[in-house]
Image (tube, grey):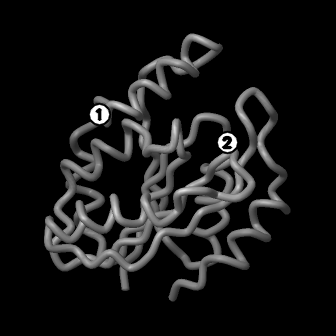
Amino acid sequence: MKTCIAYYSKTGNTKMAALYLAEKIDAKVIKLDDKTNYGGIIGFIKGGMNASKAKKAELDSSLYDEISTFDRIILATPVWAGKTTPAINSVLENVDFEGKEVYVMTTQANPSVENTEARKSFYKDIIEKKKGSFIDCFCLQGSPPSKPARSKEELSSQVDQLVKIG
């Protein structure tokens, strides 16, 4: 099964987890490059507001067609203000999920990874409305805002424990 991991990462936690998983399951990695400046305290607030309002990022539109060519799609994203990022919102809106297996992997600061069921329901509804098969959402603990990214070992261990794909 042809697999891709489309990821957005601001601090590096999601990127690290996505790259590790891609290596582990031999998946193509597709970086989602949101040009919006989310740096500093203003960027942090802006990111939370944009996520809360389900805003979408302006991404290279060719990415949507590329992602659509895969049989298994893994979307990897941080959780901002309890919601998905604008980059993933754009993917959810523009990718053809029909006949695809779709997984979601999130990273978030909250150590108890609260609201997992609400996030699963959010992704499941969108993906299934687009005739895709939502398989599962895996939530990893990232690092708190303004703290360094978790170590590769910490994230790799979480990926190994939570994600059994393929």
Q: Secondary structure at mark 1?
A: loop
Residue 12's disc is 2
Task: Give the SS element for disc 2.
Answer: loop
Is 137 on the left-hand or right-hand side of 148? left
In the image, residue 52 sits, relative to residue 115, either above or below, namely above
Q: Quadrant of residue 87?
A: top left
Q: Are marks 2 and 1 in contact (CB under 8 Å)?
A: no
Q: Position of residue 132 (x, y in %)?
A: 21, 74
**Residue 114 circle label:** none
Where residue 39 sits, quadrant-wise, is top right
Residue 19's spot in the image, x, y percent? 62, 59
User: Which image quadrant is residue 20 in?
Assistant: bottom right
Q: Is residue 58 above or below residue 21?
A: above
Q: Residue at x 14, y 65 (%)?
A: 130
Q: Earlier in the sequence, mark 2 or mark 1?
A: 2
What's the CA distance linking mark 2 and mark 1? 20 Å
Instruction: In the rendered structure, find residue 56 and report the number of the disc placed on it.
Output: 1
Residue 111, x across and y down, in percent: 74, 54
Q: Considering the image in quadrants, where does the N terminus appear?
A: bottom left
- Kind of residue indicated by mark 1: Lys
Q: Is residue 77 above or below residue 22?
A: above
The residue most toward the top is: 42
Q: Position of residue 11 (x, y in %)?
A: 66, 36
Q: Residues within 10 Å of mark 1 (few under 14, many from 20)?
A: some
Type of the residue with mark 2? Gly
Residue at image x 63%, y 70%?
Answer: 23
